[in-house]
Image (cartoon, grey):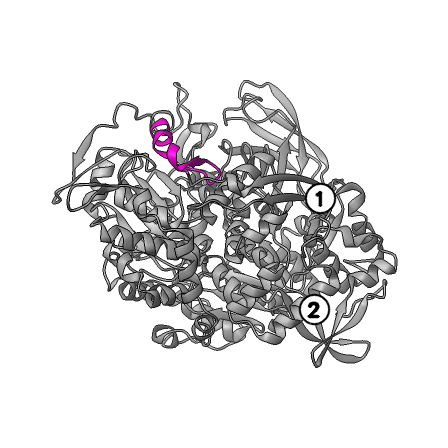
Amino acid sequence: MASLNSFNACQTLVVGNRSYQYFSLRAAEQNGLRDVSRLPYSLKVVLENLLRNEDGRSVTRESIETFAKWLEEKGKTEREIAFRPARVLMQDFTGVPAVVDLAAMRDAVVALGGTAQKINPLVPVDLVIDHSVIVDSFGTPKAFARNVELEYERNGERYRFLKWGQSAFDNFRVVPPGTGICHQVNLEYLGQTVWTRTERIDGKTVELAYPDTLVGTDSHTTMINGLAVLGWGVGGIEAEAAMLGQPLSMLAPEVIGFKLTGAPKEGVTATDVVLTVTQMLRKKGVVGKFVEFFGEGLDHLSLADRATIANMAPEYGATCGFFPIDQETLSYLRMSGRADDRIALIEAYARDQGMLRESGAPDPEFTDTLSLDLAEVTPSLAGPKRPESRAALSDVGSAFLGALASEYKKEDGLGQRYGVEGENFDLGHGDVVIAAITSCTNTSNPSVLIGAGLLARNAAARGLKAKPWVKTSLAPGSQVVAQYLAKSGLQKYLDDLGFNLVGFGCTTCIGNSGPLPPAISKTINEHDLVAASVLSGNRNFEGRVNPDVQANYLASPPLVVAYALAGTMAIDLTKEPLGHDSAGAPVYLRDIWPSNAEIATFVRDQVTRNLFRETYANVFSGDAHWRAVEAPSSETYAWDDQSTYVRDPPYFVGLQREPKPVEDIVGARILALFGDKITTDHISPAGSIKAASPAGKWLMEHGVAPADFNQYGTRRGNHEVMMRGTFANIRIKNHIMRDAKGLTPEGGLTKHFPGGDIMSIYDAAMRYREEGAPLVVLAGAEYGNGSSRDWAAKGAALLGVRAVIAKSFERIHRSNLVGMGVVPLTFAEGTGWDTLGLKGDETVTIHGLREGLAPRKTLVASISFSDGSTKTAPLLARIDTLDELEYFKNGGILPYVLRQLVP
């Protein structure tokens, strides 16, 4: 698509012996877009995107001029923009359902009289299979091979389906299992910082250069912002629309400038920095906003450190955490094996566009700012339930004891220990039963991985061992990590402590920690112990890591090793010993912690350009297991009605060319009353499936034994399982179930009214469907935070939920609800279902959806109580843009796209 180029911004850039066309911000500024050189770097990327995609419809001259006036009100005025990412990134948990949707859309297009080839990605799409490996085997040299075998046994059908997609769709590549985690592969290989493509402009074929941008079907897509690539997570349904050429409709964001000064002290890691940043930004409140880092402190952060900070943008609530291009960016690109001519282009392009951060340059203008002196950061962990719940290392032990009393109501049980059947050890509250070096957040950072290896070496020299009840694992985000740990000789020391390689994938961070040894699991459950995990991940939500583990802590990889040695959270590692050496002398953490200088020397010597180039030379080939996977070849997919993994979804059944009018919500029943901070893990869990759950019962009815259930995440290509798993998290609390003492039990239960029968949320939804009753869900603040999990919206829609009414929404989930035709509504400030006195047996009516609905319009809910009384409550419709309104009127974004593609 050629731009209308209203500001004569299309220029020629010569780098070496090659010429590129590009849309110059300097030229646009000279031709009427005043002062855009003062914009934050992240918004310069957005402005270039608008200039390059000016089509007179989704992007007009007027909308560009309006966006360029951002400096006048700093994003506080709601202005809609259409953003087109250069590419899309997916992982397999979210990628499989996305490909299922695309396959179903091909069927629907054919049914409407179109051709299947209408459904094809128009931008490059990379799907990295990284979410399916489970830590079944651990602590042995054979763990990796065994876990790979089990992965293919469980997921053969899913992998055949993805191979079919790779051959059926254009612009669609699959990175096979065992390669790494999508965000680390993106950082180390896929990301280019400046993208190029061949295009026709003014009748000539030219090479167009423009900023690398993307959206991904995983919330931690934001990691790539550390490489100055603007990107964020979206739900699969939004990503599918972007693949098919639809712009992302969004409001021009506020940009919060985060100034970094100073340098981290000895012994402080990037993990400590990001946990501090997360805590600060959560307190600040940055949901729906860009965060951009600036200040001389950036000079003291490696690119891997920046990527760690950018990775956790979902945890601090921002759309992204952006770092601009500078010399460190270029150095990393060179070290990680990018082509020399691409690096030369990036430097020349960034300098010409005013996108290169250089010493002495004035700071951009921001909506607001906050600052952190890196010298003030201390070693930290976050837990036991929230990434923003940071505690200094010295306070972790006492904080756990406080949580044991306040959160878990176990103040009298700390000193009690219980024997483990068949073992010569016992267990008590706070014992660490999982210690996992996992997740792209930290395994992309050589300094903390080398640090963990050196700490393991030093511990081994003092005769220390991991406690026998700790399940230890190492699951790096790329094969590069395994190579440099082996090459440096540090892997053998990690092996000695049980941190053997278990796989290349998300594992424990996504909930694929695998089962604990049966005797340990039995002791925990029989005595209701609050066991703990320590992981180098980004998420520690309750019910996510392992069903037997209630307290979960995020930590740097060296601290993961340290807590495996200590075996308990009820300890102050700054004062108490990790253990004792062979002579009985105490060994403290400070005795074995490696110096920054030693870590830096190892990184310099072991992490090399050749290592990256060799590792990624055949990234799409896969191992023998992958090459042996056979897949059908056809334009449309041959659905198998007996499949329990991949089934034809119901979203497009009976789809007509013209949408039916949206009906008002009349007499809706309340399916659930939730509190604050309900995550997408709560709404649509990714982990294990219980045999007694509705999903487990369905699987058994279809011939699947409990041992072969796999996890919810791997079943996302099957709507029958996923709709039954909606609101089925074992830790979710539905306050409709609150008893006379004010206590609310855990688990996905509700009451069916008017009778008050207790049943699963799924069963109640099906009974309400039979009765013809629409449904609403009510919640507190930050509803839907966490993963960019479109099944959290798909599942609600399939249960019959017409609206979710909350105090506030996390960005991605709000968008996903609109994308599935479910209206997100927010209570007026200071009100909620609790202040309205709701118990769950009321009915709710909301008019104004059929006629007169507009973006962010105030509607009124009429609530009828069981005693015949009524109340009204004003609600803000969080349909934020005109494009979103069209999606909603069409029953969702995918039906809208289909109708656009069929004449």
Query: Residue 388: within the magenta?
Result: yes
Image quarter where the C terminus lies is bottom right
Q: Which of 866 and 897 is in front in this view?
A: 897
Q: Residue furthest front?
A: 597
Q: Name the residue under label 1.
A: 366
- Residue 382, horizontal then vertical, whole percent: 43, 39
Residue bounds of the magenta highlight: 383-403
- Residue 323, horizontal then vertical, whole percent: 61, 53
| Label 2 neighbour load within 10 Å: few <14, some 14-19, many 20+ | some
The answer to which image quadrant residue 423 occupies is top left
Q: What element carries label 1?
A: loop
Task: Tell me: 726 left or right of 469.
Answer: right
Type of residue at label 1?
Phe
Q: Name the residue under label 2.
A: 348
Q: Nearer the viewer, mark 2 or mark 1?
A: 2
Q: Distance between the residues labelled 2 and 1?
A: 25 Å
